[in-house]
Image: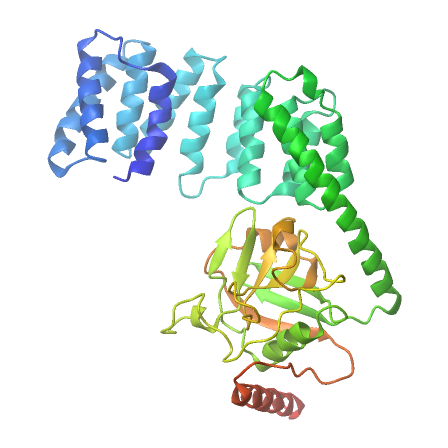
Amino acid sequence: MLLSTLCSACIVTALFGFADSADQLLKRYQMARTSIMNQRGLAPGDLQSVTDLCEELAQWNADHDDIKIIAAELQMSIWLDELAQCNILFGRLADLQPEDSRIGLAWAEFLINQEGSSAESVYADLMDRYPESSEIAIGWVRFLDSRNRFTEGIEVIEEMHSNATPSAEVTEIYADFLFADNRFEDAIAALDSIDTEALESPTLSSKINVNKTRYKTASNLWDEELAIQEAEGINDDLPEAQIITSKGSITIKLFEDHAPNTVANFVSLAESGFYDGTRFHRVLNRFMAQGGDSFSRDGEKGEAGTGDPGYKIKDEHTGDDIRKHFAGSISMAKSPAPDSAGSQFFLTHLPTPHLDGRHTVFGRITDGLTIARALEQNDEILTVLITNKRDHDYTPEIIGGTEKIKETKAIQKKKKLQLKKPE
């Protein structure tokens, strides 16, 4: 059994502790627990003895409501993967300690890790059981945060606190969700509502002040971005693409005016079918999803993340008019070396200003941000469709690999001819 499973189980141990118990059953449990933790799991020869001890604990608990022994049986049942019994024991502990929301949080973690479980229903039940618990509320919004579900997190916090002022900790999380959704002024206002001088935690107070400065910087950049988008909307002729993934469709508006060669490269590769069947080979929660490497296709021999279209393109992330990384930006992946981008790109889950001036932003998501945030490693790019472009050729200037461009153009021409053939 993996240590991660053991650590999940140890939440219950941390709640109650067993060191001070003189009961023989608890002593035997403590010895078994120490052995299992030391060897980082159940050894083959330990299974029967652990099963026997768990049965003895169960017999005792059938006639007693001793919290420590119930918790001991629960932890051993987790080790033995007795899922139904685990839920019964969690329920007993919650009933015996109705004010202790830590039991509920441990129960939630256990349930969410089970196949087919619904985090929404788990936390809905918990919030019904512990309606006054800020720990449960924070646990739920932190879960949403860990899944890039920032917009939902905003809605949950606003609904929970529609008639009451949230705690400073919840407000700080709320502001972070707003920041993740490009709502910078709202994020600043949320932090301004906190009386930092009254906080008992200097760490939280410092974090709030640092974030306020960060949000103000982002807000100024966002004002510039909105002004550019307004100007672009006058002609409304920027190229557009649809990235059709196994999770759904993501619509992209391409910044040809600011990154013309990068856009030409993306359009050219998309129309050649280069991206068809590739996968998002690198996904980091609260950051981005990266794809566009031909080595990520099934059956390819190369290592995903190291491939390119056979050439490189020049960077377009220098100068005063570069586009910045906000939630829903599409940007080129590259090595630290100059002019090392090729075909790989990434979609940002939230603003990532530390990448400004280091990677070329060449578009933004106009529809499907929720889908982009839900992408997981190895989700497939079925195809990339170019749904709008200006009336000129989209042939990129490249570094090396001239034959590759010729090959790409030949593929594009063949595709166009096939589309023109009558049925």
- Identify the image quadrant of residue 18: top left
Which image quadrant: the N terminus? top left
Q: Which x, y percent locates residue 171?
A: 67, 28
Q: Which x, y percent locates residue 9?
A: 33, 29
Position of residue 125 in the picture relative to residue 114 (left or right) = right
Q: Which x, y percent locates residue 114?
A: 40, 39
Quick one: 132 or 302, which is closer to the camera?
Answer: 302
The residue at the far left in this view is 45
Position of residue 337 relative to residue 310, above or below, is: above
Residue at 30% from the left image edge and 32% from the top image edge: 6
Residue at 54% from the left image edge and 43% from the top image edge: 147
The residue at the far right in this view is 234
Quick one: 267 or 59, which is closer to the camera?
Answer: 267
* Whether residue 352 is visible: no
- Identify the image quadrant of residue 324: bottom right
Position of residue 352 relative to residue 341, above or below, is: above
Q: Which x, y percent locates residue 369?
A: 65, 54
Which image quadrant: the C terminus? bottom right
